[in-house]
Amino acid sequence: MPRVPYEAAAYGAGSLEGCYWATTCDAPDCPPLEGDATAEVAVIGAGFTGLSAALHLARAGMEVAVFDRHGPGWGASGRNGGFACIGGRHGTGRAGPRHR
């Protein structure tokens, strides 16, 4: 299994149980792809960046397909806790005391 920063449960669909925001609207119906698909551009990831890229490409006239393991905004885009990095509180030791 590849190294991941969080426990395995964080990557499963059940990790949204009890999340308030998930109860505020219905999730879009995004069935898995069955068979073959053709598009000019395939965007992997339906978070903020992937969906924005797909929208801009589609508006520019390109045929776009978006693929994600879960639904749009399911991962980090839907759970932004304001984290800038993992382990950032430890610092690198390069910043002087006045910058900590």
Image (tube, rainbow, N blue to C red):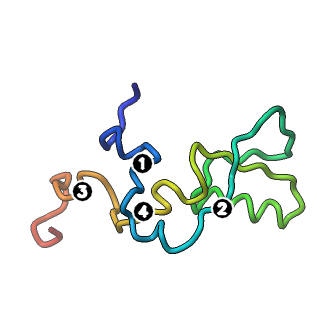
- Quick one: label 4 or label 2, which is nearer the N terminus? 2
Q: Which residue is mark 3?
A: 88
Mark 1 crowd level (few <14, some 14–19, many ≥20, 10 Å Cα)? few
Write down the residue under mark 2. Answer: 28
- Taking the image as shown, residue 28 lies to the left or right of residue 6, namely right
Q: Residue 36: percent from the left, percent from the top? A: 83, 33
Per the model, the C-alpha gap separating discs 1 and 2 is: 17 Å
- What residue is shown at x 47% (from left), y 69% (from top)? 23
Q: Is residue 65 left or right of residue 94?
A: right
- Residue type, mark 4 in image: Arg
Q: Name which residue type carries label 3.
A: Gly
Q: Quadrant of residue 39?
A: top right
Going by the numbered disc 2, the residue's amino acid type is Pro
- Which badge, 1 or 2, comes first in the chain's sequence? 1
Q: Earlier in the sequence, mark 3 or mark 4?
A: 4
- The residue where tag 4 is placed is 79
Query: How far apart, in angstroms, are the residues tagged by discs 4 and 2?
Result: 17 Å
The answer to which of marks 4 and 1 sits earlier in the sequence is 1
- Give the alpha-carbon distance from disc 4 to disc 1, as whole Å: 14 Å
The residue nearer to you, when weighing 69 against 60, is 69
* Mark 2 and mark 3: Cα distance apart in space: 35 Å
Given this view, does label 4 or label 2 mark the residue nearer the observer? 2
**Mark 4 or mark 1, which is nearer to you?**
1
Considering only order in the chain, which callout, 3 or 2, is on the residue closer to the N terminus?
2
**Dot 3 lies on which element?**
helix
The residue that disc 1 covers is 14
Q: Earlier in the sequence, mark 3 or mark 1?
A: 1
**Label 3 to label 1, Cα distance in Å?**
28 Å
